[in-house]
Image (cartoon, grey):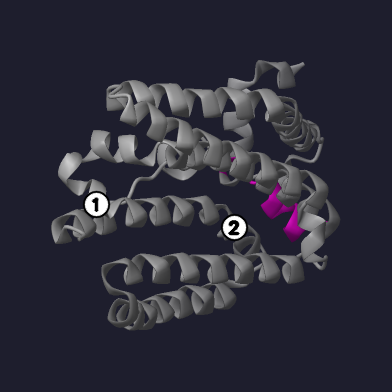
Amino acid sequence: AVHPSAVSEAYLFPPRPTLWHLGLQVDFQAFDVPTKYISDHNKKRASELYKIFLEITYISTGILCCAAMSAAPQLMKLLYSNKYTDGIAIFAIYILVDLLRFTNITLVLSAAGKTKTLMMVGLGSVICNLILNTLFYSWLGLIGPAIATLTVTAISGCLMIYFNSRALECKITDFFDLKYLSLFAAESIVLTVALSFFSRWLDKMDVHYFVILVLVAGLYGITMLALNFKRFWKALKKVNRKTELILRQKDHNLLPLRQCQRKILFQPKYLK
């Protein structure tokens, strides 16, 4: 039987092992480069930059979330206590919810002036979540609301990518390197499953849960970084290069005056 307090705790306070909550994401709004590309009707460059941004976010978010998933019982013990481990299924679902949040990027639609579309997607997500929470709870019990949230997050993410592709006048497939994305997903699934079994084995051997967490999550992170660091670093360099090109342009009207002054102030090389 699932302890009700465990479920409510896991439901109300799910883990947030994503870039947004750790503050590690590349802040595109600070650079404001995609906004300027769109406002200058340079949608091809905007779509290229958006593709790089998606790649950076799904690599880093995927590694963080799957590392948490591989040692989910131990992480739950660390964040809460042993009495809440009965709600591990709900805890894991909310990790998946965080994993899917990389698709919910509103910058493109905001820059394109599609605020009505954003409002409709947001309002629709809230309404659907309320309805599905009620239905799934009556059908599936305490785990129902978590599944409802996962479903709505996935659908809203797909809608956001679709509307972003329309705003940038390109195909959805243009946003992804499907070969690499498939390889990354396969690596993540295989390694997560393997390390989950490893963590269970260590737990049966009475190894302390914190040691298991550090070991399993560390192994996952190190392995995935070793496999994907070159690609990740290449994407970061592309973003930096595109940003530098914008900053070096003679026409400083492309950026707000205060923003230009701030960037130049902290990057003396542009004063040459």
Place of residue 212 in the rendered image (x, y in percent of width and height, measured from the top left): 37, 25
Task: Name the residue nearer the viewer: 6 or 235.
Answer: 6
Name the N-terminal-most of marks 1 and 2.
1
Q: Residue at x 43, y 38 (%)?
A: 68
Please rate how many residues cluster around mark 2, counting C-alpha atoms within 10 Å: few if below 14, some from 14 to 19, many from 20: some
Quarter of the view holding residue 241: top right
Q: Is residue 121 above or below residue 245?
A: below
In the drawing, what numbered circle is on residue 178?
none
Place of residue 135 in the rendered image (x, y in percent of width and height, measured from the top left): 34, 83
Q: Residue at x 52, y 55 (%)?
A: 101
For the stretch drawn in magenta, what is the main secondary structure?
helix
Q: Quadrant of the N terminus?
A: bottom left
Q: Residue at x 56, y 78 (%)?
A: 116
Q: Is residue 79 magenta?
A: no
Place of residue 77 in the rendered image (x, y in percent of width and height, measured from the top left): 25, 37
Q: Is residue 118 above or below residue 75?
A: below
Tell me the SS state at disc 1: helix
Tell me the SS state at disc 2: helix
Is 123 left or right of 8, judged from the image as shown? right
Task: Name the residue nearer the viewer: 212 or 166.
Answer: 212
Q: Which residue is mark 2?
A: 103
Quarter of the view holding residue 111: bottom right
Gap between marks 1 and 2 measured at Cα: 30 Å
Q: Is residue 36 magenta?
A: yes
Tell me which segment is drawn in magenta: 30-42
- Amino acid type, label 2: Thr
Q: Which residue is mark 1?
A: 86
